[in-house]
């Protein structure tokens, strides 16, 4: 060898930061879609389970599920959770009531009085 420098293999062009950002954004979108799909599937399963259940049975299932989800760290967070639950329950009840009135729904939940 006559004093020439060894030949280095050519490097691949480094990926730009924008390419990595796009990959991360795409992955994040896929994860978000998967979470949404899983949530919808669970919701549909719950609807199927509760379809012909009596109102009291539904109440007990809901209470049991919420007891597992409520934050138990402090009274403030428990109260916030309960208030948010009551707000969501009120919104859902209003939606069901409006839908039943609009359709003249024969499958409306039974009236207590």
Image (cartoon, rainbow, N blue to C red):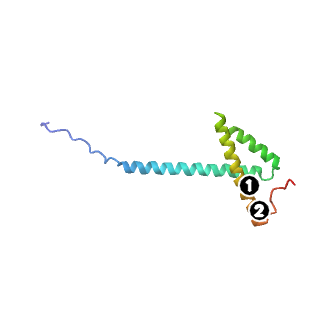
Q: Residue at x 75, y 49 (%)?
A: 49
Q: Nearer the viewer, mark 1 or mark 2?
A: 1
- Which residue is at the front of the view, 9 or 82? 82
User: Is 35 placed above or below 100 here?
Assistant: above
Label 2 Cα neighbours within 10 Å, binned few <14 / some 14-19 / many ≥20: some
- Residue situated in front as seen by the camera: 31 or 87: 87
Going 77% across and 53% down the picture, which residue do you hit? 51
Q: Looking at the image, can residue 111 be seen?
A: yes
Q: Quadrant of residue 78?
A: top right
Q: Residue furthest right?
A: 113
Number of other residues with Cα within 10 Å of mark 1, as a class: few under 14, some 14 to 19, many 20 or more: few
The mark found on residue 13 in the picture is none
Q: Quadrant of residue 103?
A: bottom right
Of labels 1 and 2, earlier in sequence is: 1
Percent across and percent down for residue 52 are 80, 52
Quarter of the view holding residue 81 = top right
Residue most extreme to the bottom: 103
Q: Position of residue 42 (x, y in %)?
A: 67, 48
Name the quadrant of the N terminus: top left
Name the residue beneath numbered marker 2. Answer: 100
Q: Nearer the viewer, residue 56 or 19?
A: 56
Write the residue at 64% across / 52% down.
Answer: 40
User: Residue 90: horizontal and vertical position, in percent?
Assistant: 72, 52
Q: CA distance from mark 1 to mark 2?
A: 11 Å
Secondary element at image label 2: helix
- Residue at left offset 71%, top offset 50%: 89
Mark 1, secondary structure of its residue: helix
The answer to the question of whether label 1 and label 2 lie on touching residues, with beta carbons closer than 8 A, is no
Q: Is residue 70 visible?
A: no
Q: Nearer the viewer, residue 104 or 79?
A: 79
For the C terminus, the image quarter is bottom right
Mark seen at residue 93 = 1
């Amino acid at each position: 060898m006559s004093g020439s420098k060894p030949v280095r293999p050519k490097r691949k062009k480094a990926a730009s930061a924008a390419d990595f950002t796009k990959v991360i954004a795409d992955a994040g979108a896929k994860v978000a879609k998967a979470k949404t799909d899983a949530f919808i599937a669970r919701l549909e399963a719950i609807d199927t389970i509760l379809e012909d259940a009596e109102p009291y049975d539904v109440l007990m299932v809901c209470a049991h599920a919420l007891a597992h989800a409520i934050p138990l760290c402090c009274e403030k967070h428990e109260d916030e959770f309960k208030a948010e639950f009551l707000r969501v329950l009120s919104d859902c009840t209003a939606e069901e009531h409006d839908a039943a009135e609009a359709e003249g729904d024969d499958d409306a939940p039974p009236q207590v009085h």
